[in-house]
Image (spheres, rainbow, N blue to C red):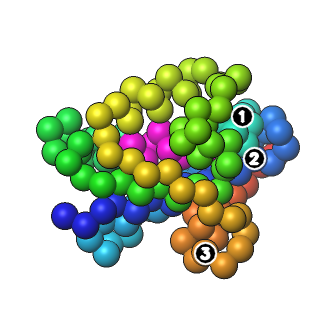
Amino acid sequence: MEPIQIYTDGSCLGNPGPGGWAAIITEDGKDTAISGNDPDTTNNRMEMMAVIESLKYLHKKYGRDKLPAIQINFFIDSNLIVQTLNSGWKKKKNQDLWAEIEKLTAWLNIKWEWVKAHHKDEQNNKVDELAFKEAKKLES
């Protein structure tokens, strides 16, 4: 099986405020978009929720037996997430979400890559737009 490519992003209208998260999961050349929102959140929480929901999607689809054998490549424009997971930056806030990410990533083969936000990466721009639309759904 080819590696799974996942682009994630979060958006928040105000910080805190209404927020949205989104992911585009590419498996064998086919894209699946998932997204959601929260009425009172922060941008960092939405960035992290996009990762969590992507991992939940993969766990549900492949199960605990098959998923560890699959290479998963995350592309994220949150330097905080990438550096925390790659370089061991201290987890100062959102301990509940970090614990969930740790639980969902245990035994998995994941590569975390930073991509520049709002730049030339088409998938990153798409996921940014999806997350923003989710946040806008909740705007009063």
Q: Is residue 92 above or below residue 8?
A: above
Q: Earlier in the sequence, mark 1 or mark 2?
A: 2
Q: Residues at badges 3 and 2 in contact (C-beta under 8 Å)?
A: no
Identity, as a three-letter code, of the amino acid under mark 1: Thr
Look at mark 1 in the image and give the residue it sits on: 41
Q: Residue at x 56, y 21 (%)?
A: 96
Q: Residue at x 58, y 39 (%)?
A: 87
Q: Residue at x 39, y 43 (%)?
A: 55
Mark 2: few/some/many CA within 10 Å (<14, 14-19, 20+): many
- Confirm whether the magenta stretch covers residue 15: no
Q: Earlier in the sequence, mark 3 or mark 1?
A: 1
- Confirm whether the magenta stretch covers residue 53: yes
Kindly state the secondary structure of the residue where label 2 is placed.
strand
Q: Residue at x 20, y 40 (%)?
A: 63
Q: Spatial distance from mark 3 to mark 1, Cα to Cα? A: 26 Å
Q: Is residue 27 left or right of residue 49?
A: left
- Considering every residue shown, the one lying at the far right of the view is 14
Q: Residues at badges 1 and 2 in contact (C-beta under 8 Å)?
A: yes
Look at mark 2 in the image and give the residue it sits on: 12
Q: Spatial distance from mark 1 to mark 2, Cα to Cα? A: 7 Å
In the image, the segment drawn in magenta is 47-55
Whether residue 86 is visible to the viewer of this picture, yes or no, is: yes
Identity, as a three-letter code, of the amino acid under mark 2: Cys
Q: Quadrant of residue 31?
A: bottom left
Count how many numbered circles sit on residues in the image.
Answer: 3
Whether residue 19 is visible to the viewer of this picture, yes or no, is: no
Look at mark 3 in the image and give the residue it sits on: 121
Q: Report the mark closest to the observer, 3 or 2.
A: 3
Could you say which is closer to the camera, residue 97 or residue 36? 97
